[in-house]
Image (cartoon, rainbow, N blue to C red):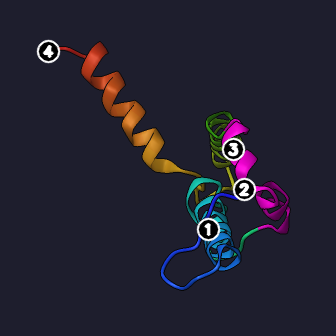
């Protein structure tokens, strides 16, 4: 297991806390939607075995989700955007730094 016994807490409690934090991280930060406070139940299937979580392609999933959200936001009747927009800001700053030299 990922967690070990520490501070009087069993590994089961620590694993549950890690799963809760990762569920929050996935649903409210990395793969967020326009509601901002709901997390799809489908994300729980990724957190069943915490030891294998590092084998998933989280970067590719984040970029695919962001690309889909940017496509939705480019429609004429859309007024909001969702996704991990910090990644967009960093990419724009890097692009501006390397390609727009004055």
The answer to whether residue 28 is magenta is no
Tell me the CA gap for discs 3 and 4: 34 Å
Q: Earlier in the sequence, mark 2 or mark 3?
A: 2
Tell me the CA gap for discs 2 and 3: 22 Å
Residue appearing at x 28%, y 16% in the figure: 98
Label 4: how many residues lie within 10 Å, few (<14), some (14-19) or many (20+)?
few
The image quadrant of residue 71 is top right
Q: Which residue is mark 3?
A: 65
Q: Which residues are magenta?
A: 40-57
Q: Which residue is mark 1?
A: 18
Residue appearing at x 71%, y 50% in the figure: 51
- Tags 2 and 3 in contact by the CB under 8 Å rule? no
Q: Earlier in the sequence, mark 1 or mark 2?
A: 1
User: In the figure, 63 relative to 6: above or below?
Assistant: above
Under tag 3, what secondary structure?
helix
Q: Which residue is mark 2?
A: 50
Under tag 2, what secondary structure?
helix
Q: Earlier in the sequence, mark 2 or mark 4?
A: 2
**Left of 73 or right of it: where is 94?**
left
Q: Which mark is residue 77?
A: none
The front one of 86 and 81 is 86
- Tags 1 and 2 in contact by the CB under 8 Å rule? yes
Residue 34, visible in the rendered structure: no
């Amino acid at each position: 297991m990922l967690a070990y016994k520490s501070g009087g807490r069993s590994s089961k409690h620590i694993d549950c806390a890690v799963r809760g934090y990762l569920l929050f991280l996935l649903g409210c930060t990395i793969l967020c939607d326009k509601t901002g406070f709901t997390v799809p139940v489908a994300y729980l299937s990724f957190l069943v075995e915490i030891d294998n979580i590092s084998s998933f392609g989280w970067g590719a999933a984040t970029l695919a989700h962001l690309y889909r959200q940017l496509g939705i936001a480019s429609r004429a009747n859309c007024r909001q955007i969702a996704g991990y927009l910090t990644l967009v800001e960093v990419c724009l700053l890097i692009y501006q730094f390397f390609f727009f030299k004055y």
